[in-house]
Amino acid sequence: QLLDGEQLRRALHNRIQELRGNIRVFVRTRPFLPNDGAASNSSIDIMPDGESLAIQGKHAGEGHGFKFDKVFAPSAGQGVVFDEVSEFVQSALDGYNVCLFSYGQTGSGKTHTMQGSGNGAMRGIIPRAVEQILQQAALMQSQRWKFTMKASFLEIYNEDLRDLLVMMNSDGSFKQRNTSSANKISIKRNQEGKSYVDGINKVVIDVEDKAAGLAQLEAVMVAAARARSVATTKMNAQSSRSHSVFMLHLCGSNEESGTIVEGALNLCDLAGSERLDRSGAGSDHKRLKETQAINKSLSSLGDVFTSLANGSKHIPFRNSKLTYLLQDCLSGDGKALMFVNLSPTIESSNESLCSLRFAQRVNAVELGKATKHVQYSSKQGSGRR
Ligand code: ADP
Ligand code: MG
């Protein structure tokens, strides 16, 4: 079967990405906001190469330099940022397991990056990714490709999983009654060793009709936001203390060749990375438990990256729900991209430095190299175009 120009271009692109290693780190510093008080100088200096930055310490003359795959200026808008991740989104259509994380302290712009707001220029990666997939799927119809897309949305709080779409039917309509207590979801592995979430609601997004698809996404986001705020109020918790993962399950089949391609896109808004153990959390049992859960999952994520970088035989995926859930994206033929979100204020410079150091650990990972030594079942179940 001959590849057409577009398929060839994409195959080549994916190959180049594989050669470069499959984990990227992008740094995004948000602009100053009115609440930051009298805007002082930024603690972050972005270099003209677009890949390096210097961060000023709290003490005069103290500075640290870092280099990543990309460093955005605070003026970089949602569209500019999305342009840089659209190839990752495309990979999910091509049959890869793709994961984007946003990492950083509370208030640094994680949710703005992933979700954004409104229907216009401030839309974040989630709505833009869905729109791109709808557009691409429509284009590929002429080559006899048919796609289905399903969305799930979950939250990990204190190492417990919660389905944020329990109130929806799989056709995107809302349920009449609150059935949230009925739904127990858990991470399982199938025979191919791929992870999936058992019992989670999957809402079908209409691929044939772009307007309908976008309306369904809108309903999904509304339902998830509602579920989140109900749950956090009930538990007197804050959403910044849980991880949320928006999942798109994509399946394409070619009516001519019979080829089937399955991919997934996971968009993960992590819990605030601020060093909670210093905040007097110990005075309250509930807060302490939260703190331990967040520390555990974020440090597990770091440990997984480090183990991959070192080519360890054992990758500690099972140490947290987050890494267990996203194992397929972090191993074998997966692709991952981490946004490090930073606040520009001097007051935040210590937290920013911690985030950058965490990310430096991530950036050293070269999946292509590490996976040679790794023993896990990563069956290439999904065919590539
Ligand atoms: P987090 O999710 O990390 O706690 P948010 O995404 O909620 O942080 O961002 C905190 C505030 O800063 C929000 O009001 C958000 O709209 C604003 N903000 C974040 N990043 C940007 C940006 N790049 N441009 C403009 N406003 C931003
Ligand atoms: Mg947030």
Image (cartoon, rainbow, N blue to C red):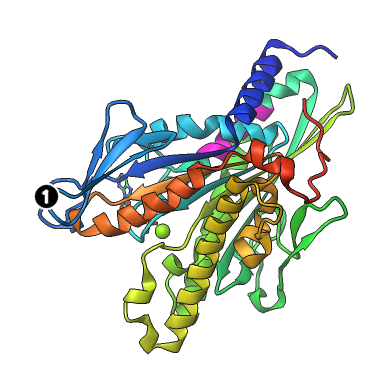
Residue 40's spot in the image, x, y percent?
11, 50
Q: 76 or 295, which is in the foreground?
A: 295
Residue 91 in picture, x, y percent from top left: 64, 33
**In the image, is 157 to the left or to the right of 142?**
left
The magenta span reads 128-137
The answer to whether residue 14 is above or below residue 163 is above
* Residue 167 visible in rendering: no
Q: Secondary structure at mark 1?
A: loop
Quarter that holds the C terminus:
top right
Viewport quadrant of the N terminus:
top right
Near mark 1 (Cα within 10 A), the count class, few <14, some 14-19 or many ≥20, is few
For the point 70% across and 56% down, the residue is 314
Asked whether 63 or 40 is in front, the reply is: 63
Q: Residue at x 71, y 77 (%)?
A: 182
- Residue 245, image x, y percentages: 57, 56
Figure quadrant of residue 259: top right
Relative horizontal placement of residue 244, taking residue 74 as reference (left or right): right
Predominant secondary structure, magenta span: helix
Can you identify the residue that label 1 sits on?
Answer: 40
Q: Name the amino acid type tagged 1.
A: Ser
Can residue 188 be seen from the camera position used here? yes
Q: Is residue 258 left or right of residue 345?
A: right
* Total number of numbered discs in the rendering: 1
Which one is nearer the viewer's eye here, 227 or 199? 199
Is 8 situated left or right of 103 in this image? right
Look at the picture and state if 354 lies above or below 251: below
Q: Is residue 134 magenta?
A: yes
Give coordinates of residue 94: x percent, y percent.
70, 31
